[in-house]
Image (cartoon, helix red, strand yellow):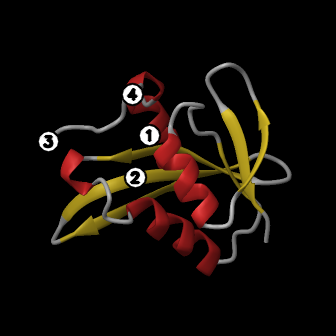
């Protein structure tokens, strides 16, 4: 099994355990196999989508991130934030398609986008 994420160093065993303990970790599975994970972490005025990972490169383009977003909205979350890499055009297009709006450049590597509910 491979993890598909170009800068995976921010996901550690401890961060996943913490997400589980806090009830923030969500997974998408198919036929008993985990396809992806995403933590939804409270950040004051919004909930941050963090540590979004697809577990196999073959799952890219299957709408997994959109499924996470739709699920979060369906269970009542509003004001969902995301911080894609500045050069991640596919993720930014996906966020825009799902109603997120660009807010500001965090630093040279990251942007902040939000979907208000």
Along the polypeptide, which appears first: circle 2 or circle 3?
3
Residue underneath mark 4: 8
Does residue 74 appear left or right of residue 13 in this picture? right
Along the polypeptide, which appears first: circle 1 or circle 2?
1
For label 2, the crowd category at 10 Å Cα-Cα, with few meaning under 14, some 14 to 19 and many 20 or more, is many
18 and 82: which one is in front? Answer: 82
Eye-nearest disc, 1 or 2: 2
Eye-nearest disc, 4 or 1: 4
19 and 48: which one is in front? Answer: 48
* Pointer 4 with pointer 2, Cβ within 8 A: no
Q: Residue at x 38, y 45 (%)?
A: 53
Q: Residue at x 76, y 31 (%)?
A: 105
Residue underneath mark 3: 1
Residue underneath mark 2: 37
For residue 99, which numbered disc appears in the image?
Answer: none
* Pointer 4 with pointer 3, Cβ within 8 A: no
Q: Farthest bottom residue?
A: 74
Element under label 2?
A: strand
């Amino acid at each position: 099994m491979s993890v598909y994420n170009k800068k995976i160093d921010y996901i550690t065993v401890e961060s996943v355990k913490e997400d589980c303990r806090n009830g923030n970790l969500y997974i998408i599975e198919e036929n008993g196999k985990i396809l992806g994970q995403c933590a939804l972490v409270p950040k004051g005025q919004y909930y941050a989508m963090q540590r979004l990972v697809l577990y196999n490169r073959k799952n890219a383009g299957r709408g997994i991130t959109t499924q996470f977003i739709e699920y979060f909205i369906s269970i009542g979350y509003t004001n969902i934030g995301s911080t894609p890499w500045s050069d991640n055009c596919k993720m930014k297009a996906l966020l825009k398609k799902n109603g997120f709006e660009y807010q500001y450049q965090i630093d040279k590597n990251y942007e902040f986008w939000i979907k208000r509910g």
